[in-house]
Amino acid sequence: VQLQASGGGLVQPGGSLKLSCAASGIIFNSTTVTWYRQAPGKERVYVAQINAVGNVFYADSVKGRFTISRDNPHNILYLEMRSLRPEDTAVYYCNAVKFGSVYWGKGTQVTVSS
């Protein structure tokens, strides 16, 4: 199983970015998929999740600004980020859990700065 996040970059405060996570070796349907982020010097934290039955959850810090979605036929997870703030700066990781197995992808850097 491989997960590869992409789409990060440098954006000004108030800007937008859309992250993607392409998966191979796993079928996204009926899989719990999650975005996490890790800021410099801090622990990795949960950002947003779609569970196996399609329910969506967000961390309070991103609720109303971020949207998680997935393209099951193409095994791609997305995170659309709007109204970005400097405190959103972090490496963003995608995660998949299926049948008790946990998979992590390499992260993508998001930097919010003027």
Image: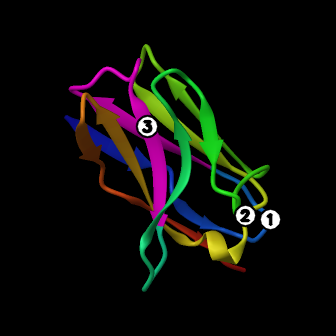
Query: Which badge, 1 or 3, comes first in the chain's sequence?
Result: 1
Residue stretch in magenta: 18-37
Closest to the observer: 40 or 60?
60
Q: Quadrant of the C terminus?
A: bottom right
Q: Residue furthest top?
A: 73
**Residue 24: image x %, image y %?**
25, 29
Drawn side of residue 41 relative to residue 11, left or right: left
Disc 2 + disc 1, Cβ < 8 Å: yes
**Residue 76: image x %, image y %?**
44, 29
Drawn side of residue 68 relative to residue 104, left or right: right
Q: Residue furthest bottom?
A: 41
Label 2 SS? loop
**Residue 8: image x %, image y %?**
51, 57
Q: Disc 2 designates what residue?
A: 84
Query: Which badge, 2 or 3, comes first in the chain's sequence?
Result: 3
Q: Residues within 10 Å of mark 3 (few under 14, many from 20)?
A: many
Q: Residue at x 25, y 43 (%)?
A: 102
Q: Is residue 31 magenta?
A: yes
Q: Residue at x 50, y 50 (%)?
A: 7
Which secondary structure is most common in the magenta stretch? strand
Name the kind of residue labelled 3 in the image. Answer: Val
Q: Disc 3 designates what residue?
A: 33
Q: Residue at x 70, y 58 (%)?
A: 60
Name the kind of residue labelled 1 in the image. Answer: Gly
Relative to 47, say whether 61 is above or below: below
Mark closer to the observer (1, 3): 3
Label 1 SS? loop
Q: Disc 1 designates what residue?
A: 14
Name the kind of residue labelled 2 in the image. Answer: Leu
Q: Residues within 10 Å of mark 2 (few under 14, many from 20)?
A: many
